[in-house]
Amino acid sequence: MPLFKEDYSLLDQPGVTQLLFYPRKDSSLPPLASQDCSVPVENDITVNVRFHMNKNTSPNILFFHGNGEIVSDYDDIAPVYHQFDLNFIAADYRGYGKSTGAPTASSMIKDARTVFQFVVDWLKKNDYSGPKIIMGRSLGSASALEIAANYSADISGLIIESGFASTVKLLIRLGIPAIQIGISEQNGFNNLRKITHFMKHTLILHAQNDQIIPISDAENLQSYCGARSKQFQMVPGADHNNILMVAGRQYFELIQSFTNKIEGKRVKKFFRKKNPETPS
């Protein structure tokens, strides 16, 4: 039974969903050596998950993308994860890519749990023994934090990239009059409350000039995070949509350093002059 089982119905209003979600369809085949799985989430509704696997012992990153993205957007990025000895698993939302149905806040949170349990079973069945790390970008931070708060015993680490702390402020920035239609933090995604319950290794990445989710959200997530081993890394000069491009190789080096720490390997530090790692 999930620790956080809340009512997201106010976020499911058409005036909210049409600005919160930007689904687009995709029928492309996965790259060679990658695999798509259709995860049943409800009667006649499936969510597509794309597995880009490297080695059976590599850390496994389950990734939830932003609101205007789909899993195939990461087909060219997955091989870079492989270069850093990481398995990369990307999940869509209802209505996105090859997934069926229509996206809502309620279904996104519910489906995150179902997708996670499917991935755990798939990894076990296919003999992938590396640690499981949950990663969420932008809107996907809500899915990642739902899993982190409810299934912390089953994962080894959490990565939040360009994530949001306040549901109300995010909606207002998207042009949704959250307060006027009765949405508060209490009936929002509760990202801050959820991250207080996660006690394992945590990495928070954010662009210095994020124009959609200000860096203060990342600072709040870092402050509220219950983990002793937590790291906050700002990417200088980047914004919400080019953080990976601006950071370049250091983006993946930082993630590998994080997973190395989880595995007890030697840890490197990056951007040390401006953004020292939070002491463990």
Image (cartoon, helix red, strand yellow):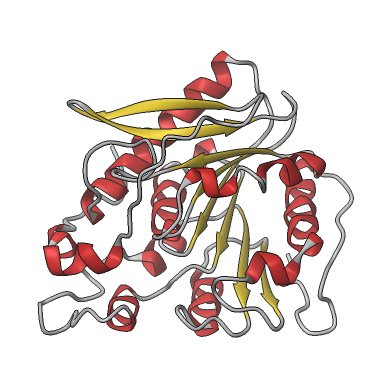
Residue situated in front as seen by the camera: 54 or 215:
54
Q: Position of residue 169 (x, y in %)?
A: 33, 82
Residue situated in front as seen by the camera: 21 or 159:
21
Is residue 279 visible to us here?
no
Position of 274 relative to 6 (above/below):
below
**Label tally:** 0
Position of 113 relative to 251 (above/below):
above
Please state if 78 lies on the left or on the right of 82 as rendered: left
Locate the C terminus and report the quarter of the image it occupies. bottom right
Residue at horizontal 49 percent and vertical 27 percent from the top: 36
Please state if 272 lies on the left or on the right of 135 as rendered: right
Quadrant of the image occupied by residue 205: bottom right
Q: Position of residue 71 (x, y in %)?
A: 49, 44
Quadrant of the image occupied by residue 31: top right
Residue at horizontal 42 percent and vertical 35 percent from the top: 27
Residue at horizontal 72 percent and vertical 44 percent from the top: 81
Q: Position of residue 75 (x, y in %)?
A: 61, 42
Position of 47 relative to 272 (above/below):
above
Locate the N terminus and report the quarter of the image it occupies. top left
Residue at horizontal 86 percent and vertical 45 percent from the top: 265
Residue situated in front as seen by the camera: 48 or 121:
48
Q: Position of residue 128 (x, y in %)?
A: 65, 23
Is residue 229 visible to us here?
yes
